[in-house]
Image (tube, rainbow, N blue to C red):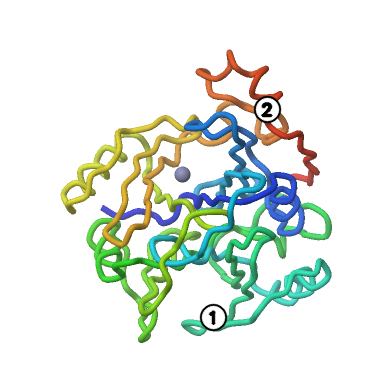
Amino acid sequence: MKTKGIHHITAMVGDAQENLAFYGKLLGLRFVKKTVNFDDPGTYHFYFGNESGAPGTIITFFPFKGIQKGTVGTGQVGVTAYAIPEGSYLFWQNRLSEHGVSYEETERFGERYIAFEDPHGLKIELVERASGENSRYEIDSITTDVALKGFAGATLYSHEPVETARLLSETFGLKRTKRTETIDRYESDGELGNTVDVAHGNLPIGRPGMGTVHHIAWRADDEADQIEWMKEVNRFGLLTTEVKDRNYFTSIYFHDAGRILHEIATDTPGFDVDEPFESLGESLKLPEQFEVHRGAIEAHVEPITVEKGTLV
Ligand code: ZN
């Protein structure tokens, strides 16, 4: 079996409005779903992606105001990388500078990266990639020829890099394509979210909290495929949770030996299952079981203002 690559990445952050301003405006992603954490309905769960929130483009957040800052380190996805269209590197340098976001330029495997942190400490990179379709969502001065396409990939900080790498190759069907002394690259056949770097060496142990990734989700086609994935993970020697209904996909979860929390999520049904494509993200969507508590939930979560872009 082979996954197409990353489905989504989920992180813990601080203030909800700051999170929206950064991803929905400064980075220009489309805010595709405003809902609550299905396991903790008193808190928001935000989803951002390309125009439709396609698998491989989705970053999701649990914003908790006043949460303690975490430490990026082993047992986590250390860095989340976005693919930007070729020729847009300078645009993004300028945009970050204009908005007072300091960045570094780094290089690995022959590609140059713009590396920075979001307002809550999450580590983000931008890298030019030819693969992957341009987003069809525009906001502010971010036109489709420069807009983030979706994930390039992620760098995993494993507590047991050899074991995490074995999971990627033996279970997920990724191929090791490049290697240095400190980092190995694995690739899937997908167009986006298809390069996964596994860091080796002396990294600090991660502590969950604001500015850290909670889990990384990999793509399964549909619910039947997901059951096969569950068996595949079991064959590798790891136990998964039961299938959980996340409304926009179904999920199973498990930890690897390197303490990273993985999820396998289905490509179907997607974000237009409970609101029209044209107005994704505009109203608070709740799963059926929480609709009876809508009044209490709406009174509890902090009001936010969403700036809308244009579908092209
Ligand atoms: Zn998830």
Q: Position of residue 98 (x, y in %)?
A: 83, 70
Secondary structure at badge 2 equals: helix
Residue situated in front as seen by the camera: 133 or 146: 146
Residue picked out by circle 2:
300
State the mark number for residue 51. none
Residue type, mark 2 in image: His
Q: Are marks 1 and 2 in contact (CB under 8 Å)?
A: no
**Residue at left 50%, top 31%?**
38
Label 2: how many Cα within 10 Å (few below 14, some 14–19, many 20+):
few
Comparing marks 1 and 2, which lies closer to the viewer?
2
Q: Relative to 122, is 29 above or below?
A: above
**Residue at left 80%, top 69%?**
100
Indicate the quadrant where residue 81 lies: bottom right
Q: Relative to 279, is 214 above or below?
A: below
**Residue at left 39%, top 55%?**
4
Q: Position of residue 6 (x, y in %)?
A: 44, 55
For this orientation, the residue located farthest to the top is 292
Whichever of labels 1 and 2 marks the residue nearer the N terminus, that label is 1
Indicate the quadrant where residue 183 lies: bottom left
